[in-house]
């Protein structure tokens, strides 16, 4: 039980409450929210502006973790009003936190804009220690867009700043670089990074962040077709996330469990988890993730040859993606429709949707999406007896695959991997099997 006595209605009392809120946030967001609500009340009563702004930030972060994005932005907005008058450093922190809300909500363009604003302020005051954290967060936004090259450039900048500041490599960078290796098909390297992140998170007592990494370990085993371990780690992550009220995290895990059961050909279970995921996402009005899960559900129906429902879910995904201008999910929907028409050898409609998907993927520099599109184009035109067009797609696929394989070298990330004794080789075959969509759970600095 927290003692909210009158002696805390002082500057030092508010500071103590803010510190307690930050600590509680690692394991109990409800308690953290209770503490920072008191801090807001006390700071207002004594006119302590800096303490009030920090309490608003703490409340915003708690609300983001509870997937209440609108309320989170309201609290960050209040903090921003205060810091714009008194403290550039504080303002940079709020901008980063607001960017994280947009990142969670799937508004990647807005997220990158706020990260850029935060980095601009940090560079103006020479705060390269926190800049390293924001660079990692900005890398996540590019990563979710599918632009792994830009993501890795941000991660390398972040790593360089940590090293130059003689700081240990933080868990969130291990986790996020692990996701990159997972997405490009280097599962051995991904697991090494994830387990390093997990060890750091558990040592720090950061249970919520540890649950995200646990989920990513499960997703790696899913890609490796080790479904027993995939279900074990994903289920463990879900238990922790449920305990701490992380609705968005639970939703992502359910989506990944659905994907796992689909790969196991247990389609009834797959659809059950997809529907659970949709229910949770709808509760927090996370439209981008709703669109993604609708498309994943369409993929399950496609696998069981229920093309009517597959088309229905692909179109529902597209409708939401167009409403919120979500290019990532528009690409997924167009790709799903192309695959559907390819099954019926309708090359005209297949080509129409492939071209739409390709244009969007190129605009985002998404090598992973482009690989999937080119591979489907090659197979579709070959099946239709159009060998010349099929070869063009095959050539583009091979070129795209080579770029994916060279991401380590071009971004110097391999040196860091070897430095950490993570000396592993990229398996080319894994690249092709990893070129599919799935929900990853990222680590960010609040």
Image: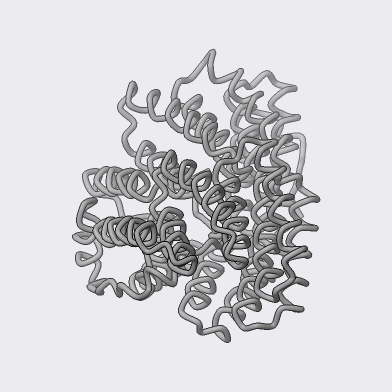
Q: Does 89 appear above or below 140?
A: above
Q: Seen from this angle, which residue lies furthest front?
A: 385
Horizontal arrangement in the rendering, residue 391 relative to residue 418 (left or right): right
From where the camera sits, is residue 230 visible? yes
Q: Residue at x 35, y 41 (%)?
A: 132
Q: Residue at x 77, y 63 (%)?
A: 309
Q: How is the image coloured?
A: one colour
Q: Does 201 appear above or below 287?
A: below
Residue 207 placement: quadrant:
bottom right
Q: Quadrant of the N terminus?
A: bottom right
Q: Does 423 appear above or below 212?
A: below
Q: Position of residue 342 (x, y in %)?
A: 57, 63
Q: Position of residue 51 (x, y in %)?
A: 60, 28
Q: Depth check: 306 or 272 in front?
A: 306
Q: Seen from this angle, which residue lies furthest top?
A: 85
From where the camera sits, is residue 246 visible? no
Q: Position of residue 301 (x, y in %)?
A: 71, 69
Horizontal arrangement in the rendering, residue 210 relative to residue 321 (left or right): left
Q: Does 300 appear above or below 119?
A: below
Q: Position of residue 178 (x, y in %)?
A: 39, 63
Q: Residue at x 69, y 71 (%)?
A: 239
Q: Residue at x 25, y 64 (%)?
A: 417
Question: How many labels were placed on the picture?
Answer: 0
Residue 395 placement: quadrant:
bottom left
């Amino acid at each position: 039980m927290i003692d909210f006595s009158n002696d805390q209605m002082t500057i030092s009392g508010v500071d103590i409450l803010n510190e307690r809120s930050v600590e509680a946030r690692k394991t109990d967001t409800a308690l953290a929210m209770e503490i920072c609500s008191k801090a807001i009340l006390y700071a207002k009563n004594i006119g302590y502006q800096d303490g009030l702004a920090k309490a608003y930030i703490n409340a915003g972060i708690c609300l983001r973790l509870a997937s209440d994005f609108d309320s989170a932005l309201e609290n960050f907005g209040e903090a921003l009003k205060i810091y714009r008058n008194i403290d550039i450093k504080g303002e940079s922190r709020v901008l980063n936190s607001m960017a994280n809300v947009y990142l969670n909500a799937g508004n990647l363009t807005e997220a990158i804009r706020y990260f850029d604003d935060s980095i601009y302020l940090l560079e103006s005051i020479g705060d390269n220690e926190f800049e390293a954290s924001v660079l990692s967060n900005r890398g996540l936004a590019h990563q979710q867009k599918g632009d792994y090259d830009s993501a890795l450039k941000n991660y390398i900048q972040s790593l360089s700043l940590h090293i130059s500041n003689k700081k240990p490599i933080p868990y969130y960078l291990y986790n996020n670089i692990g996701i990159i290796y997972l997405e490009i098909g280097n599962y051995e390297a991904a697991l090494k990074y994830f387990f390093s992140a997990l060890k750091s998170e558990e040592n720090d007592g950061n249970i919520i962040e540890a649950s995200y990494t646990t989920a990513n370990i499960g997703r790696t085993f899913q890609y490796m077709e080790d479904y027993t371990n995939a279900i074990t780690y994903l289920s463990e992550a879900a238990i922790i996330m449920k305990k701490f009220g992380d609705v968005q995290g639970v939703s992502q895990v359910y989506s990944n469990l659905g994907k796992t059961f689909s790969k196991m050909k247990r389609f009834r279970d797959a659809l059950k988890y997809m529907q659970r995921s949709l229910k949770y996402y709808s509760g927090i009005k996370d439209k981008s993730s709703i669109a993604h899960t609708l498309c994943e559900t369409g993929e399950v129906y496609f696998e069981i040859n229920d093309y009517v429902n597959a088309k229905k879910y692909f179109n529902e995904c597209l409708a939401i993606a167009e409403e919120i201008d979500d290019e990532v999910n528009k690409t997924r929907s167009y790709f799903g429709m192309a695959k559907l028409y390819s099954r019926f050898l309708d090359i005209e409609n297949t080509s129409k949707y492939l071209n739409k998907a390709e244009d969007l993927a190129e605009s985002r520099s998404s090598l992973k999406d482009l690989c999937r599109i080119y591979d489907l184009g090659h197979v579709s035109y070959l099946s239709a007896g159009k060998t010349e067009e099929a070869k063009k797609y095959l050539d583009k696929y091979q070129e795209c695959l080579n770029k994916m394989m060279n991401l380590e070298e071009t971004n110097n990330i391999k040196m860091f991997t070897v430095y950490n004794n993570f000396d592993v080789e990229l398996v080319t075959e894994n690249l092709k099997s990893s070129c599919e969509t799935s929900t990853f759970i990222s680590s960010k600095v609040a």
